[in-house]
Image (cartoon, rainbow, N blue to C red):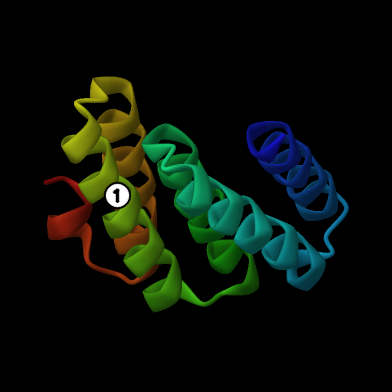
Amino acid sequence: DTDADGVACCHIGLIYRLMGDYNRALLYHQRHLMTAQRSGNLGAQGMAYSHMGNTYESLGHLQQALDCHKKALSIAEEAGDVAGQGDAYANMGGVYDGLGDSHMSLQ
């Protein structure tokens, strides 16, 4: 079942991120994204981009993190997922703050 595979990849990615193995976490979040895209599950796609963004932020790759959070926001808007939009804005604010753009972090 594709959705179950995606959920498993998501959880494994989260565990690797918590362990500090960010590169391996990214691999699992990318697998989660691929399974979500194959099944057309917008919620899972947004979640995968969000987790990838958080992982890129942990690696210090702030522009890649921002790009992922923008994709998560776009998907949440398309799906009408208000909570997902809020999460994406919060994540983007944190990245903008990390980039030293306090004005954008408050937008």
Horizontal relation, residue 49 to residue 20: left or right: left
In the image, is residue 47 above or below residue 32? above
Across and down, in percent, residue 89 comes to 26, 42
In the image, is residue 20 above or below residue 36? below
Across and down, in percent, residue 103 comes to 12, 57
Q: Would you identify the image quadrant in which residue 24 lies?
A: bottom right
> Which SS class for mark 1?
helix
Q: Would you identify the image quadrant in which residue 90 lies?
A: top left
Q: Residue at x 82, y 45 (%)?
A: 12
Q: Residue at x 35, y 65 (%)?
A: 66
Q: Residue at x 21, y 58 (%)?
A: 102
Q: How many marks?
A: 1
37, 54: nearer the viewer: 37
Q: Would you identify the image quadrant in which residue 70 lies?
A: bottom left
Q: Residue furthest right?
A: 19
2, 54: nearer the viewer: 2
- Quick one: quadrant of the N terminus? top right
Q: Which residue is mark 1?
A: 93
Local packing at callout 1 (Cα closer than 10 Å; few below 14, some 14-19, many 20+) is many
Q: Residue at x 34, y 49 (%)?
A: 72
Q: Give the amino acid at mark 1.
A: Gly
Horizontal relation, residue 15 to residue 62: left or right: right
Across and down, in percent, residue 94 comes to 38, 51
Horizontal relation, residue 19 to residue 53: left or right: right
20, 45: nearer the viewer: 45
Across and down, in percent, residue 106 comes to 17, 45
